[in-house]
Image (cartoon, grey):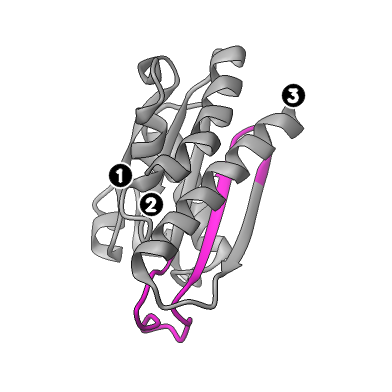
Amino acid sequence: MRDLLPHAEKAAALLRQRKETVAVAESAAGGLITAALLAVPGASSYCRGGAVIYTRAVLLGFKGITEEMLAGVRPATEAHALFCARAVRERFAADWGVGETGAAGPTGNRYGDPPGHACVAVAGRVERASTLRTGSGDRLANMHAFAAAALALLAESLERDG
């Protein structure tokens, strides 16, 4: 977790400076993105919360999310990560949403993505998404890499919007 703190501290400082909030919807990172944000003192001023959305059924459990909205949006894609970022932003009434989806390992997912594949996205006044492939089957290392990528994308997006 300590390896994630520099990324979280940067995003937290930008959010506090702007008096803005963030919410997180993560999957393969398993809660590490939210945990890193909460590890920074003063988190209640900028972090609305997070959800580990590990299955489609859980995502459909969010108020207002329907199968029709997810039609054509395959998990573990940039489009899916962006959908989750938008959804969590709206449902948690945050200024920014972060979405993450992927295959931590040691094997790939049922959609054909290899272990170490993740997509992260940020939704706010700017929207961005990116794909990460670590090339590794190390589940824990991948989870940390996914969280670091999501936090870095959040900080970059905040800087771009500044």
* Mark 1 residue element: strand
Image spot of residue 83 (x, y percent): 49, 53
Q: Which residues are magenta?
A: 102-127
- Give the alpha-carbon distance from disc 3 to disc 2, as whole Å: 25 Å
Position of 135 relative to 151 (above/below): below
Query: Which residue has dot 1 on it?
Result: 51
Q: Quadrant of the N terminus?
A: top left
The question of residue 124 being in magenta is answered with yes
Name the residue at 54% across, 71% down.
134
- Give the alpha-carbon distance from disc 2 to disc 1, as whole Å: 6 Å
- Give the alpha-carbon distance from disc 1 to disc 3, as whole Å: 27 Å
Name the residue at 48% across, 57% down.
146
Name the residue at 52% across, 28% down.
9
The question of residue 41 being in magenta is answered with no
Image spot of residue 33 (x, y percent): 41, 44
Image spot of residue 119 (x, y percent): 53, 62
Image marks 2 and 1: residues in contact by CB distance under 8 Å:
yes
Position of 64 relative to 146 (above/below): above
Q: Earlier in the sequence, mark 3 or mark 2?
A: 2
Q: Which mark is residue 26?
A: 2
The one nearer the camera, 8 or 110, is 8
The one nearer the camera, 125 or 114, is 114
Q: Amino acid at mark 1?
A: Ala
* Mark 3 residue element: loop
Query: Which residue has dot 3 on it?
Result: 162
The residue carrying pointer 2 sits among few (fewer than 14), some (14 to 19) or many (20 or more) residues within 10 Å by Cα, namely many
Magenta stretch mostly in which secondary structure? loop
Q: Amino acid at mark 2?
A: Glu
Residue 40 in which image quadrant:
top left
